[in-house]
Amino acid sequence: MRLLSIRMEHFRSFYGVNDLEFSASDSRPVTVIHGENGIGKTTILNAVFWCFYGKTTASFSNPRELINRLAISEGREWAAVDVRLLHEGMEYVARRGLSKASSEEKFTVHAVDSDGNSKSLQKPWAFINSVMPETMAPYFFFHGEGLTKRSSGGVGSSFRQAIRNILGFSFAETAAEDLKHIAKRDWGPRVKELSAGQAQLKKALAEKQAYQTRIDEASEKVTQLDEEISNLATAIDALGSELASSNHADASKLQQELRSKEALRDSKAQELRDLGKQRQLLVKRYGWAIFGTPLAEAGLDFIDEAQLKGRIPAPYDRSLVNDILDAASCICGRAVEPGTDEESAIKALLETANTASIQQRLQKARGVSDKIYGLAEEFLVEAGNLESGIAGCNSDLARVTDEINRIEQQITEISDTDIAEKRSRFRDLRNERDTKVGRRNSERDAIVRAREALRAAERIVLKEAKGDRQLQRAQTAEMLISALADRCETRLAQYEVDSIDRIRDRVNSILEQFSRKSYRVAISEEYDASLILADGSRVGESTGERLLLNLAFVSALIDLARERLRDPGDFLVHGTVGPFMIDAPFSELDRSYQSATAEFLPKHSEQLILLLSSSHWTEAIDEKIRPLVGKEYVLVSHSDKLKEASKPEDVIVIAGRTYEQSRYGEARPRTSVMEVR
Amino acid sequence: MTSNRSITKEFMEKIIDTPELIGSEEAAWALDEILTEIIAIEKRHTFQVEGSTVNARRAQLRKHLDTLIKDVV
């Protein structure tokens, strides 16, 4: 989807009708809108957002006052926004209008064909959501300054949720939630009711219920602890930054060193946990072969011995025995009369006689034993590698912990009351966080164990319910629905791990090209991104570096959304291509990073709309962006007051020409749009 | 619905005889088939049913699951 134009009528500071065309060409995909603070840049971004979704962004002030005040005073008590857009080769016009009298909004979308004929769409909001899902929109239309407010530590569950939305998780998440609700509310009580009076079944059901309650309680605790850990991480990070920027040179240096070592310790601890998980998987994959080896050996010994003694296979063939019985004559020439003891003795031989199938089974048994030996050997090699990795990691962890202790000791020896007090708070907060992390991990483990026990109890219930059709149906339904919810969550977890890897690769590639230093990015499972050095130690980021990292992070997300455009969308919401409309993206970047950002942003967007104040528009940005700019505007503030002599001229110079941004003594106070030509 | 109903039916019949199947790797693909149908319901309620409530969506899902289970048990 690309935006073609916007018309704002009596919308906030835009009195009357104000039109603005966006550049939608491939060669010049950038539109730049210059405007000083408070004039209406954020209003334009919100006009698009409101037109599409009937909402404004979180940081938009007075969101209920959308109609221009002057228009209201003149009796024109309405506001409207029209957005023309291009989607899959077809042009559409979305229009949202608001009347003060009714307080009702009217939203329409018309499809316009090449002859200019327009047709109203029956479900306009459904169309807009299919083009750009509302959950993803805040990442395509966003406020750059707000990005730096996301501190490097503790980003919170709402941020994680927003990222999961942009990754397309929303339907699958809702599905898992709905399925759990249906299993618990509809089928659970039905099973209980139907099983009344069956003692064994009742017991199994009670166990099942207890495990389910355990899972629910533990999940609730995990969510709560996640939030608390996230808040503590934010506080720890803030205090760490205070200490690192302290006036006391030694303390500041030591604290910076400490933060870096702590980040390294955290990354080693994570590595160790990952290796531990790999070890568990290894045992799960090969465990049966290891435990099966003695059995396989015993089985093969038995076969070998029995074969040696001629017992397996039997030294006579089934067809030979049948031939003797059919011919009623033994190979020695004696007659075998029916009903005689001799005939019974020969018939008994059929039970142990050798057949092609016995031969085949013997071969199969040997094959299975050989496979078990092979797998056991593979296990030993892989386990050996894993164990040496774990040993290496443990030794790194011990070394870095020693270094941390040494630095902490040195900080403790600094005689400064303020630093000592902050350090003490820092330690308390960290201990509290570690305790909570430990509790969260135990709750997570408890969930895994309870889930396994729940499945076992479900199997017992199902077994007991056999023969009772109604009960069996109810039980099957409950089991299936719970299994579907679990499967849904497992798949989402897998996608999430994969997505974090892909975001990391993309951000690293941007950093590699545009960062002055050799930084890499570390992304936690809460999507907390931080800059690290090659050895895994964390960098004390400047505000500019943080903004660069965040812009690279969002660019990577948008890249992923574009990449998933062709996904079938049967599990995750399929990706989307949209305009990247950013308010104040360069505000806190230094010159070199402004230039880098101005270079990479257009590369990661189909269409880029930049809303900038004059202080953000530098030569470095102009140089990078200018060749890609297709449309450029200046927002002009009209004041009905006379200019105070002390106020400087409010102008902006673009491509060598000067444009005024404020006009005084005008009939109506308002903001207008002036195109730069 | 995009998924193959006979696959899910076959799977449902199997789990009645072998409940151990639920949670196994073997069953994962069948669960995915059913999930595709469920996600389609979730999506339809978000994009096509104007003003759809959580209850309306769950009722639709409940009905779908009920039909699926009634078919085979």
Image (cartoon, rainbow, N blue to C red):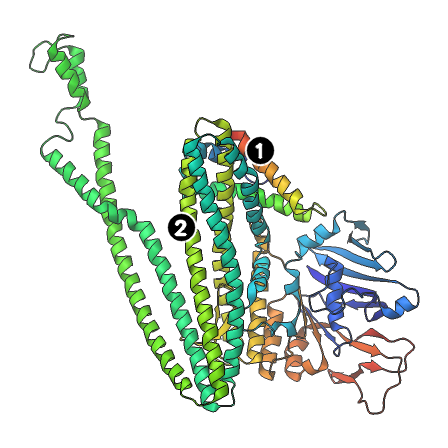
Helix, strand or loop for disc 1: helix
Helix, strand or loop for disc 2: helix
| Camera sees residue B20 | yes
Which one is nearer the viewer's eye here, A188 or A115? A188
Which one is nearer the viewer's eye here, A539 or A312? A539
> In the rendering, at what x and y percent does residue A473 appear?
50, 31
Q: Which residue is mark 1?
A: B67
Q: Is residue A637 left or right of residue A191?
A: right
Chain letter, disc 1 residue: B
Q: Which residue is mark 2?
A: A449
Task: Give amino acid for label 2.
Answer: Arg
Chain letter, disc 2 residue: A
| Camera sees residue A539 | no
Q: Is residue A448 left or right of residue A129?
A: left
Q: Are marks 1 and 2 in contact (CB under 8 Å)?
A: no
Q: Residue furthest bottom?
A: A646
Please say if A152 is above or below A368: below
Residue sitting at x 76%, y 47%: A122
Q: Which mark is residue A542?
A: none
